């Protein structure tokens, strides 16, 4: 498996484009007659595009995705559904595919009607520019950004056990309202493996659980989340190597989302191991990356392992304060601040000094060993900064 | 039922005192041979004083409470247990009661050993000043403050159905790490009703569920939470009037905690009605007050009902976006920004203008009607401000 360039356009036959104006953007991804699977938000309020796309992806066939930023087309009633359908039909006509081959996605402010004239104009622009190139993938990634500060894309190549070489490319956007169960994130992944919709769905669900669902920015869950995976039609090729590559691609996109969390100045990766069950590991890891007290401690470069241990304590995970260990890592520097329930990072110790200097860095890994079993999980998060507050208190004005 | 003065000392026979030095404080509450019940944190990591107090309150008898601020005596191992016991024995000797009549509580930083010389000196000071007076209750409330900006106390008087007049007084401290299931809060309540420990426990649990457990500041759950209720020994007097008065007292203390949440500039009360079950109402109300996006919108005076509806959507509560209504209230000004799924607060409308002016105020009530049933619940919260981030990124330095 190796990293390659080109994002979604690393895959032959995929054309992409992006167009932006003011606060709005439109991305189009054209991959004719592909097999497709999607994972949707679990929020009970579902945006109009989610309702439309759930229907069109049902038969596992897609040819094109249209996604807009700037307006979520959510809580917009029948008019919103109408707007999402109009987006779909404009694109279906533009690339000459059946209407039920179109997926629609939206991100942005909730509860305002979509400004159709602008979106429609941007769709026209994007359709005109569709092409298979690195630049096109980048443009599409840029077009779906909201408060993201940089476009997010990744691509990998791997060799299947049957000897075939395949590639997978993805673009994604964060960056607020990111939570377990995917707060406002759109992610579109293409691959040239030949697979059936059912095979894709199984693989995608496995990856999403381990990656996108382990990203927490603020704990809010969006109404608009969607991850779509498109491949060539076919069957019987997905194997462990493909799954590993897809996991890796999704984890890279998830990391970028956490890195670029709203207002984030620091990135944290939390690995919980030694758990009695996978659920315990996941609950504990998510609880730490979600804790406002851990997040503000990270912002303040305070190695406050007490808040880390407390977050494990209320996570619901089985834990024992006499066996828990907490390690901080940055590059090749490592410090055990809690060792089997014993605090090592007291004032005046070398451990605390090292812990403080690690916490000053921009990328920190927190490793918690519960020492109760053999399960582990990793969660991705960021600090809680003044800028998070500024961005979100000003968002809709 | 009426509000009275005096806090915990409104109750005859209760003596209180508080002593402070630097970042530390000690409160002592002396109510000899009282019936007692307590509710504790659900965090799996439990502070040393919680372990001690759980044991001493088991038989339902207490005579004195000693509580310190500045250090949580949590995650402090055997030494921590020793320290909590030393606090208890100093107080037991001081007021001449059996050791198992002493409750100990602590709040402050986690994972550092208690500075026993300072705490011991403050206990001596407090014991010397014990008295039944409004000033003494106030001093005790002050001594348990951490990042609280003002002491919190309340007292009510009510007449039981048997004609007796009783009173209830309480002090409490917030103000960070406040969450469902009581993030770092200490609350001590006294009453002159004659009751058994079992009766007190039943009444206290009912009140806590409706009040303290519905306060959210940041969603973190503390390792040190405790609520203690002490009464005269006896039996058979608790009735609906007492419960109503206790509910009211606890709701007033809960309101104060939310008002004084760390860094809070605004207070919100969220009432969810029309729910299919009590749990639905509670989940929805808590989800709204906990949402970082609702909290930052409140800080920014943005009537972002979209975030409110989204928070209900992911709360787990049963809801229907076509029946939900959202109302904002401030004093006698009311605006329905969502009416049975229809958005009223669009740009340029009177509704939005009024909603914006309501959101500018310091106390806002959000009323969500799910229109699916007859259950309701209220949650108490505050905004998420720059100061929350500042306070918590600087806390342990």
Image (cartoon, coloured by chain):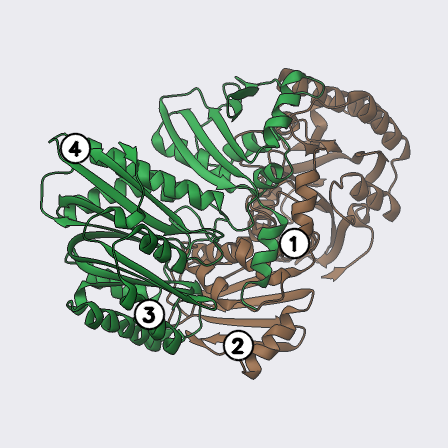
Chain colours: A green, B brown
Q: Residues within 10 Å of mark 3 (few under 14, many from 20)?
A: some
Find disc 4 in the rendering and name its residue: A160
Which quadrant of the view contains residue A142?
bottom left
Please report the residue visible at 75 percent of the width from the left and 33 percent of the height from the top. Answer: B70
Please report the residue visible at 86 percent of the width from the left and 25 percent of the height from the top. Answer: B121
Where A304 falls versus B157 (above or below)?
Answer: above
Q: Residue A293: where, in percent of width, then height?
A: 60, 40
Please report the residue visible at 56 percent of the width from the left and 62 percent of the height from the top. Answer: B270
Where A392 falls versus A191 (above or below)?
Answer: below
Q: Residue A29: where, in percent of width, then height?
A: 26, 58
Q: Residues within 10 Å of mark 1 (few under 14, many from 20)?
A: many
Find disc 2 in the rendering and name its residue: B336
Choose mark 3 or mark 2, whichever is in front: 3
In the structure shown, which secondary structural element does the residue marked by tag 1 occupy? loop
As drawn, the residue found furthest toward the right would be B128
Gap between marks 4 and 2 measured at Cα = 58 Å
Find disc 3 in the rendering and name its residue: A125
Residue B385 is labelled as 1
Where B190 falls versus B368 (above or below)?
Answer: above
**Discs 4 and 1 share one subunit:** no
In the structure shown, which secondary structural element does the residue marked by tag 3 occupy? helix
């Amino acid at each position: 498996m190796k990293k390659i360039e080109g994002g979604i356009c690393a895959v032959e036959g995929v054309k992409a484009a992006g167009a932006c104006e003011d606060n709005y953007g439109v991305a189009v991804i054209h991959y004719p007659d592909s097999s497709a699977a999607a994972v949707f938000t679990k929020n009970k309020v579902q945006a109009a595009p989610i309702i439309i796309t759930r229907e069109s992806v049902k038969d596992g066939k897609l040819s094109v995705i249209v996604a807009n930023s700037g307006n979520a087309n959510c809580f917009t009633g029948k008019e919103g559904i109408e707007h999402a359908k109009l987006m779909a039909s404009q694109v279906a006509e533009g690339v000459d595919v059946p209407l039920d081959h179109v997926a629609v996605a939206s991100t942005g402010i909730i509860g305002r009607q979509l400004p159709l004239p602008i979106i429609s104009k941007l769709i026209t622009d994007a359709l005109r520019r569709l092409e298979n190139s690195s630049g096109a993938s980048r443009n599409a990634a840029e077009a779906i950004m909201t408060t993201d500060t940089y476009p997010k894309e990744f691509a990998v190549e791997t060799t299947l056990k049957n000897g075939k070489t395949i590639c997978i490319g993805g673009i994604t956007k964060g960056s607020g309202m990111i939570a377990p169960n995917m707060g406002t994130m759109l992610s579109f992944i293409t691959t040239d493996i030949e697979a059936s919709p059912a095979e894709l769905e199984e693989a995608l669900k496995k990856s999403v659980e381990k990656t996108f669902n382990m990203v927490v920015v603020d704990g809010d869950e969006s109404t608009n989340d969607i991850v779509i995976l498109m491949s060539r039609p076919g069957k019987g090729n997905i194997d462990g190597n493909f799954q590993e590559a897809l996991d890796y691609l999704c984890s890279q996109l998830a990391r970028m989302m956490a890195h670029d969390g709203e207002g984030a100045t620091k990135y944290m990766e939390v690995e919980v191991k030694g758990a009695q069950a996978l659920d315990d590991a996941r609950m504990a890891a998510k609880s730490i990356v979600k804790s406002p007290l851990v997040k503000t401690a990270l912002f303040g470069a305070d190695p406050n392992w007490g808040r880390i241990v407390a977050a494990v304590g209320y996570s619901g995970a089985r834990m024992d304060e006499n066996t828990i260990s907490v390690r901080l890592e940055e590059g090749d520097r490592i410090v055990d601040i809690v060792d089997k329930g014993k605090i090592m990072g007291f004032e005046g110790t070398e451990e605390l000094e090292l812990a403080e200097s690690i916490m000053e860095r921009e990328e920190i890994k927190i490793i918690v060993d519960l020492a109760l079993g053999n399960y582990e999980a990793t969660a991705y998060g960021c600090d809680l900064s003044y800028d998070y507050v500024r961005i979100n208190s000003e968002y809709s004005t």
